[in-house]
């Protein structure tokens, strides 16, 4: 495979849609009819922004958001004045809605959630990456229908990929409207899969490195940035709906002795992929314990 050739994503490599995926109309029907947001940070704002842009979403009342982080709350309300109302307090958000999305910082979770009173019939969706589902259930009791979601910022434009646990239809429906959703019921599996979200910075840093390499060889920065962004997007299209064997086949199909095989084998011999696996192990420890172990850093493990 050569990058100079124009090639459409091969349908042979596209796996089936996730078994729990539904059509847009079904997802719309399963989304809670009143939604509140406690914690108007980057991710919480992205989720709400994405939902506000969904055509056909029927709500009994406006989205209700907490007043904390006043600047971001005001920006959302100004962008969607007919859809978003800023509450006077976090408790007002809980009182006014059937589904509460919680998106506060991990260090704030105990204090913020512990101060709120929930109803038994409420649905609670936590976006707090490091807070275990069982702890969320304890904090929001007597509310019993709880899920944890790990969305990425692209949910704001309907192109997100979100991991959800457990596989509750209403929680999956929210994120299916914002892109794609993969749901699991085993927390150990969830924590391992969550580590993939830690590759976002690496993904962008790899592109930045490629852009800077082009610029160092007199490629104008506008063309360098546009080409790197476009080529990574094109390559990712082949694996966007990967099946179990998709990635293995994509690596195998690189032309033997060709430039693409040369580059990935050189990276492999240099330890780049071993370093990637070590970085993922380090991320797993961080997600499980909330702490960083310097002994697990790739450079330390490989020395």
Image (cartoon, rainbow, N blue to C red):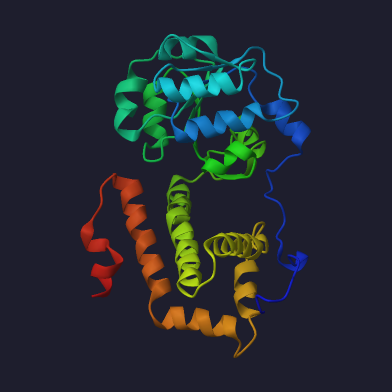
Left or right, 217 with respect to 234, comes to: left
Q: Which residue is depicted at the point 43% across and 23% down?
A: 71
Q: Which residue is depicted at the point 45% across and 56% down?
A: 199
Q: Provide residue 93's location: percent of width, then percent of height.
A: 48, 14
Residue 290, quarter of picture: top left
Q: How many marks?
A: 0
Residue farthest bottom in this picture:
257
Residue closer to the observer: 243 or 254: 254
Height in image: 29 above or below 133? above
Residue closer to the observer: 168 or 200: 200
Residue 115 visible in the picture: yes
Height in image: 217 above or below 72? below
Q: Provide residue 108's location: percent of width, then percent of height.
A: 31, 28
Height in image: 178 above or below 188? above
Q: Which image quadrant: the C terminus?
A: bottom left
Q: Which image quadrant: the N terminus?
A: bottom right
Residue 182 visible in the picture: no
Q: Provide residue 40's location: percent of width, then percent of height.
A: 45, 26
Left or right, 120 with respect to 28, comes to: left
Q: Provide residue 3's location: percent of width, then percent of height.
A: 65, 75
Height in image: 190 above or below 131? below
Q: Which residue is depicted at the point 38% across and 15% down?
A: 116
């Amino acid at each position: 495979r050569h990058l100079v050739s124009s090639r459409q994503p091969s349908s042979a490599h596209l796996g089936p849609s996730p078994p729990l995926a539904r059509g847009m109309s079904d997802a719309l029907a399963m989304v809670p009819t009143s939604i509140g947001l406690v914690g108007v940070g980057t991710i919480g704002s992205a989720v709400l922004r994405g939902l506000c842009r969904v055509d056909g979403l029927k709500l009994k009342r406006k989205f209700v958001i907490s007043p904390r982080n006043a600047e971001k709350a005001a920006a959302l309300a100004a962008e969607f004045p007919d859809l978003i109302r800023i509450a006077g307090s976090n408790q007002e958000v809980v009182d006014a809605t059937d589904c509460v999305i919680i998106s506060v910082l991990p260090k704030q979770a105990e204090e913020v959630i512990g101060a709120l009173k929930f109803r038994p019939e409420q649905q609670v969706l936590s976006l707090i990456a490091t807070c275990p589902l069982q702890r969320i259930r304890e904090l929001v009791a007597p509310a019993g229908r709880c899920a944890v979601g790990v969305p990425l910022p692209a949910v704001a434009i309907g192109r997100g990929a979100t991991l959800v646990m457990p596989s509750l239809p209403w929680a999956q429906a929210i994120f299916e409207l914002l892109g794609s959703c993969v749901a699991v019921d085993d927390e150990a599996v969830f924590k391992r899969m969550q580590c993939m979200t830690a590759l976002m910075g690496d993904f962008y840093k790899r592109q930045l490195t490629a852009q800077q390499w082009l610029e160092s060889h007199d490629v104008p920065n506008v063309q360098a940035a546009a080409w790197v962004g476009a080529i990574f997007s094109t390559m990712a299209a082949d694996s966007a709906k990967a099946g179990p064997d998709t990635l293995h086949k994509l690596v195998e199909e690189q032309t033997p002795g060709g430039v693409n095989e040369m580059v990935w084998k050189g990276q492999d011999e240099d330890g780049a992929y071993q370093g990637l696996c070590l970085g993922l192990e380090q991320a797993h420890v961080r997600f499980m314990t909330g702490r960083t172990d310097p002994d697990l850093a790739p450079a330390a493990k490989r020395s």
